[in-house]
Amino acid sequence: MLDPQIVLASDVVRDLDHLTVTEFRTRAAAHERDGTLPLDNLRQIHDLGLLHTTVTRGRGGLGGSLRGEDPALFLQLLRTICHGDASTGHCFQVHNHAFWLLEELATPEQVERFVRPLAARFSLLATVGSEPGRVNMYKFNTKVRRVDGGWRVNGLKNFATNGPHADLIVTFVAIDGIEDHFQNHLMLLIEPTMKGVTITDDWYRPNGMRAARSSVVTLDDVFVPDLHVLGAPGDYPRGRWQGRFHLGFAANYLGTTEGLYTWYLDHIRARGRAGDAITQLRIGEMRVALDAARALFNQAISAWNSESVVEAELISMSAKSAAAHAAFKLSHAVILGAGATAQFDEYPMSRYIRDLETHVIHAGHDRTAQILGQAALGEVFDSTLQR
């Protein structure tokens, strides 16, 4: 189900696609039940040479970011991983978003200290901006103050996906005493071994996406040396980084929905209902919704190389919401058509739907639609916003 624009050996692609709908999907039930990060799946992705997809080729990756040598690669691989397990896909997504951010803004010294060593082995990265009670995605209660040789930071962050096993956490904080987020937004490279850092995922008990373990990170008077400061203050909002990540969520929603749809087709055939006219009608309607979401998703990827940055962001937001709406439409149709026993734990249907319900609301789709409307009407808007 990968699109043909992906430049990668076909046997590797087939291996990944096979893994997702066999081993990943089979193991997902245990990962969900036990609340464990799918390290086994991620290691298999690494063994295929696909884990550090957004890192440039000269530094151990595949150049698969939207601005890289193969702009479709990361997103289409993410979509494929989600055919079998959305949680594994989200761990892969967060890791690659963090690596993309790290590599592009790293100093030459940081490239040698962090990028090359982490890309040369199995590693996991996290990015965390979220905080309890935050009302604006660019404003933080976690504050830093300048000291000799670095910064002191105090605060509480949450939803740090990959946190329990992260080698490095790109952490968003605010410089104390400065209000403008274009001046106070700072990124710190937090290592779990730093004194004063506590990472726990005991609180993480969502309805779905349970294996995408997301930690609370407590920062208690942590000293962060200058080498661990990524970029300059305000680089993240000025670089419109949040807008670059819209399509990662679209890929997850779309891939997970495709996985549910493919499972449903097999389930219907196995139950001997492929000849039922109403079932055929509903499956045809599902295909229409998926085809529309796929087409917009691929158009949005292409837009990053053919349109202005803002227009690419807007199309990406539209693609993200289209994939979300397709996910809900298909979920409802599958529930009605699969039968009561398909909701038993021996089948993956309920997990697919739980994961979609939890992950799709990560983005504020009403807010997305409002921003698209603002743009169409010529009003002031910010197309980097997630919610």
Image (cartoon, rainbow, N blue to C red):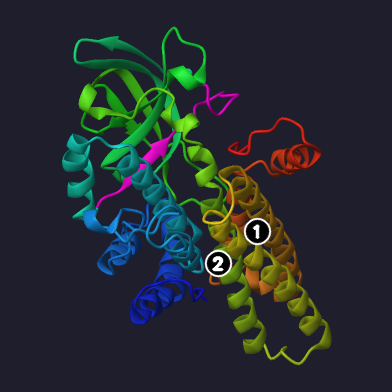
- Residue at x-position 34% and y-position 58%: 63
- Badge 2 element: loop
Q: Amino acid at mark 2?
A: Asp
Give the residues drawn in magenta, as a range: 123-140
Q: Position of residue 242 (x, y in %)?
A: 52, 39
Q: Which tag, 1 or 2, sits closer to the chain's start?
A: 1
Q: Which residue is mark 1?
A: 323
- Residue at x-position 33% and y-position 17%: 153
- Badge 1 element: helix
- Residue at x-position 70% and y-position 71%: 340
Packing grade of label 1 (10 A; few <14, some 14-19, many >=20) is many
Residue 71 visible, this angle = yes
Picture layout, residue 179 above or below residue 89: above
Q: Quadrant of residue 197?
A: top left
Q: Position of residue 222 (x, y in %)?
A: 27, 19
Picture layout, residue 365 above or below residue 349: above
Q: Amino acid at mark 1?
A: Ala
Q: Position of residue 67 (x, y in %)?
A: 43, 52
Q: Which residue is mark 2?
A: 345
Q: Nearer the viewer, residue 46 or 39?
A: 46
Q: Quadrant of residue 42?
A: bottom left
Q: The C terminus lies in which quarter of the figure?
A: top right
| Pair 1/2: label in front | 1
Q: Nearer the viewer, residue 141 or 28?
A: 141
- Residue at x-position 59% and y-position 77%: 262
Q: Position of residue 26 (x, y in %)?
A: 44, 71
Contact (Cβ within 8 Å) of mark 1 with mark 2 = no
